[in-house]
Image (cartoon, helix red, strand yellow):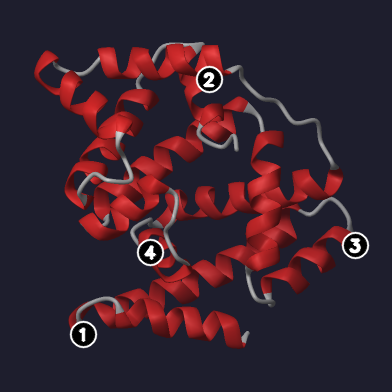
Amino acid sequence: MRYRLLVVAAAAGLVACGDAVRVVKQTLAIQESFFRQIDQRSPTPEIRNTLRALARGSGDSVQSLVANGLLRLDDSTLIRRMELMAAMMEASDTVICAAIVRGNAGSSQMTLAMTQLQGPDLEDWIGLLVEAQVAQLEQRKAHEVTSAALTRSVEAAVASLPDSEQNRMGDVLSGLEAASDGDACWAGRGLFRQGAALPEPHRSTFARGLVQP
């Protein structure tokens, strides 16, 4: 619980005073949603108790379970994850958006991004995080896509951009770490948006590729 309170305080400290109350309220709503989803999705009392204990801990174990469990989720859930990630990036400021795109967003930054989700979107996001933990604990079969298939899906997403943006997208993606936050955020928003609009099987391949190591 102490860790959770520290995250709330850190997240509130990253925003203007006028938004701090909203962030704190939404962060507490996120915590409540976690426990609600744990109770709803846990197939056994043992798993429920394990997940509740982890949710009260430091957060590192939860992140590890989620990261390892995402590949065990079905395509439709990973597509929904991609859509929600796109929504969080669109609503977040450039610094947080760029950190998400690069995969190095801190706990406070991710908390702020999550506070941009409301109602069913927030429940879906928390639900898939909990489902990933359950999938990992149950050791469901993991599914991966080949690098060749993922490359084709990314190329399809880039090709769906206007001609004037395709070269810029390629340049930013080829040097993402060195790109400015503005360029990284622009590329991430565009790529996730186009990826969610791809026809199958590219869309499912794209969404699954996003969670592969």
Which residue is painted at 75% across and 31% down in the image?
142
* Lower sequence index among marks 3 and 2: 3
Q: Observer-nearest residue: 206 or 19?
A: 206
Query: Which label's residue is closer to the chain start, 4 or 2?
Result: 4
> How far apart are the two marked residues, 3 and 4, measured between alpha carbons?
30 Å
C-alpha span from label 2 to label 1:
42 Å
Q: CA distance from mark 4 to mark 1?
A: 15 Å
* Residue 29: image location, x then y, percent: 48, 71
Query: Relative to 12, does residue 183 appear above or below in the rendering?
Result: above
User: From mark 4 to mark 2, how far is it between C-alphas?
Assistant: 28 Å
Location of residue 39 with respect to 54 vertically, above or below: above
Quick one: label 4, few (<14), some, or many (20+) residues within 10 Å?
A: many
Residue at 48% from the left image edge and 78% from the top image edge: 7
Mark 2 or 1: the one toward you: 2
Q: 99 and 202: which one is in front? A: 99
Q: Please indicate whether residue 84 sits to the left or right of residue 32 in the image.
A: left
The residue indicated by pointer 4 is 115
Quick check: marks 4 and 2 in contact, CB under 8 Å?
no
Circles 3 and 2, Cβ within 8 Å, touching? The answer is no
Query: Residue flagged by tag 3: what amino acid is it?
Result: Glu
**Residue 81 image offset from top left, x and y in percent:** 49, 40
Check residue 205 in the rendering and tell me which mark sits there, or answer none. Answer: 2
Between the C-alphas of marks 1 and 3, the distance is 42 Å
